[in-house]
Image: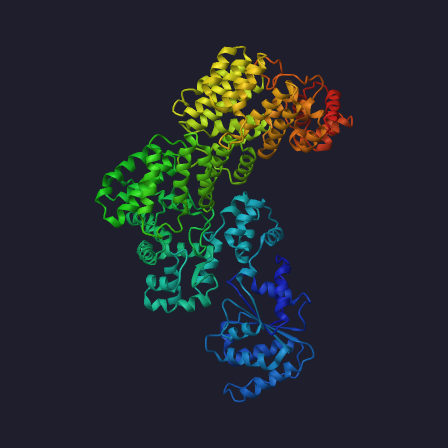
Amino acid sequence: MDGVPARRDWAVARPRVAERFDEGARGPLTVVTGPPGAGKSVAAAMWAASGAPPGPVAWASLDREDHRSAAFWTIVLAALDDAGVAGLPAVPGPSGRGRESFLTALASVLGGAGAPVVLVLDDFRPPSGSSVARDLARVLTAAGPALRLVLISRGDPPLPLHRHRLTGDLTEIRGGDLAFDEQETRALLDRHGVRVTAPSLRALEANTEGWAAGLRLAALAMRGHPDPDGFAAEFGGDDPAALDYLVAEGLNAQPARIRGLLLDLGVARRFNADLAAELAGREAGGLFADLVRRNAFVVPLGRGWYRFHAMFAEALDLTSRHERPGGAVLLHRRAAAWFARNRLPEDAVRHAVLAGDWSRACRLVVGDLAVGRLLGLTGDRAQFCSGGCGGSSPHRELARLMAGMPDPAGSAAPETAVVAAATALAQGDHRVCAHRLAHAERHLAALPDDRAVPARLAAVLVRVVAALPCPDGAFHGLVRELDLLLEALPRGRTDGRPELRALVRHGYALMDLRAGRPRQAAAGLRLALPAAEAGADLQLRRCVGDLALAEALQGRFGRAADLVARAERLPEVPADPGGCPVPAVHLAGAWVAFEDVRLDDARAELGKVRQAAGRPPDGLISVLRALLTARLDLASGRPGQALAVLYSAQEEAAGMPWLRRLLLLVAAEAQAATGAVGAAMESARAAGGAAGAITLARIQLGLGEAAAAARTVRPAVVESTAVPADVRVEAWLLDACLAYRAGDGSKGRRSLEHALRLGERERISLPFAQARNWLFPVLRGDPALLGAHRALIGPLGAAAGAGTRPDADPGGSGGSGEAPMAFGRLSARELQVLGLLSEMLTTEEIATEMCVSVNTVKTHLRSIYRKLAVTRRGEAVRRAHHLDLL
């Protein structure tokens, strides 16, 4: 009643909140509600003192006893008088006579004021049905636009707010509007002389949900604290100062029956009126509407659901455990039963676990087909509770809940053993998983039909996931069984579980991939992809990685590169539930880099494949990694080392004939490079197919048998998409070379154009780089063809040095004498260094210009020299100008 409160020295300006008050003051009624300590009064006082209100501000701070009619109007008149409003009527006496005339006179005085009067009633909390609320509503209506009323309260005041909402006369500033954002939190900590890192600041804001009192208490506690960052990250409702405030203002301030209902509901992460009646009895259910109206620590979630403010929930939990030791178990049992009846299994599982009812929890997990969540197949993109009540993803929440499950050895319930097996697998323990799974399968036959199918499905699902990413011979049967079990479920039962169908499709696709059918595998993986996108990052990363690998096996490196880039945008998955990381993405990335003539990048990605390989490693991944490693060795002029790598991979490729053929193709090139031409030709013939014919033709050409080479390669020059795109490019390119050598320029140009078009479309660069000795002279003599395909050929210009012969042998095999490929595309940073080098800057000056260390510049220079095949600065600049790099 003493005017607008003075600004606190620690208060911070909050322009976005002030704008809401400005908006409200343009209309007749502003209601400001929020929990105790939300900063309602402070924000209103700062706005009132800012000069922004449209007229004088009358501020009245109320206590509980001030809501009797005579006391209330006495305080209001005093505030209006203090604000300069003249001619105010006298308050009616205790008898209440003259009340009508008083209200009319007050409205008339306010309505006749020159400028609008802003009346702020702080802590306005009249009881329901109070005459004070009715009379205030009459004055507000009668005074018209000359009165701007601002009501500050913990809950909605008993005024006809619905009418004001309908007419657009109401501005509501709620707890969410008052919550501090990151910038405001930083400013508040600065006011208290506290500095923390950005992650700790965000953690503090999240823990407090921007609650002003919590932030202020935290700031006070962090003054002089030895570890303010650690304190900020851990601060919550269990902090002694915060707990005292929350209990005093949020819990103990309530009537006894409301207080009891709060403690009962404190066990639930989210609740509605029906759950309140289940937990606290039907009579308590009738108090629910009053609770959500009067307690501003209750946050609406929509559709009748609510939750408690995070810090208040912690305070309720601590208080309940102190006042009711062991009482929460019965409440959790009731909640589990209620959520299960209402088909909300995630919540039911949580409460069953907290009640220690592991058998019920496991039956719920299995019956809800949620074992996939426990295994990490889904959940990174969805909240565990559909009401938005948790920050953890479903599989992480479920794994955390089930981590404390006791050993199920003494339980005959197969669901318990299956969930225990899945939990062990999620922790990477295959041995315990297999033991518990065997225990479960011994008891599956005893289950009734309604439990048998979900339990068997869960067991098979665990076995399928346990086999990934290294499927064994039984994998196809497991995937087929999982498919049949899904079909046996009632229609609609798998709605909301897309990860199960995605896993089946992915499983079939993996079988196609291992059988050497990459086209069918890619088709299956594309079907699995939409469902995987709705699941966890792990399943999506696997699906995208395997699809990238399938595209690379078809020579579609453009598609593979796009998929690798997509996978790399997902969070890195360090370990899957089986303990094996995801190597397919890095393997596909290595292949893309190699075909794009980025050899250093290819080596780096292959190193990541090695790190990601499982124990035991997946045979397909191991062989393909060996294949690429051997090709890199060949490109670097180490054919003997390439042969050693290929030899070590033969055993793993024994069960996959198509992989053995790929090994033979690379072996043929390596043998030819070592001079073992007979062995090379034998390997090429044994490999067979179009790729074998091309390799054999290159060897024949290296021996000077051009006519034989032309006959050998002719059947491989086809348009069939059954032949990988990179193989078709090599066939057309070799056919073009042979035609040019034979003097048939027209045919050569047609074949070369075929190769260039396909290479450009599929982003295939390597064959053109390997054919540079004859290709670049041809293209320099055909500016039209070169211009049409400069996007593909231009980046390979580093190979087009002087001294190449138009009739040189292609590919560098079969004794052609071509130097091993030891170049690559310059990175953006290397091009920057090269540009500064051309300006005659020293190494130290380049480092200063780029804001990097001298050692970093030296590393870039070594890479530039190697890629441009030079040894000195001047040579590098001259070569760069020749290649139009500068």
Is 655 placed above or below 702 here?
Answer: below
Total residue callouts: 0
Q: Is residue 580 left or right of residue 735?
A: left
Task: Determine which quarter of the picture holds residue 827.
Answer: top right
State whether residue 777 is above or below residue 235: above
Q: Is residue 421 visible?
A: no
Q: Is residue 686 visible?
A: yes
Where in the figure is residue 353, as x and y percent of width and height?
33, 49
Which residue is drawn at the image coordinates 55% and 33% (left, top)?
Answer: 557
* Image quarter (top left, top right, bottom left or bottom right) of the C terminus: top right
Residue 66 percent coordinates (x, y) = 52, 75
Which residue is nearer to you in this view: 831 or 230?
A: 831
Question: Residue 414, position in %: x, y?
Answer: 26, 43
Which residue is found at the position 51% from the left and 80% from the top?
134
Task: Tell me residue 305's x, y (percent).
Answer: 43, 61
Q: Seen in the image, is 353 located left or right of residue 632? A: left
Residue toward you, 701 or 483? 701
- Report the side of 560 relative to 753 (left or right): left
Residue depicted at 40% across the width and 55% down the height:
317
Q: In this image, 145 relative to 491: left or right?
A: right
In this view, 21 is above or below 617? below
Q: Quadrant of the N terminus?
A: bottom right
Q: Nearer the viewer, residue 323 or 501?
A: 501
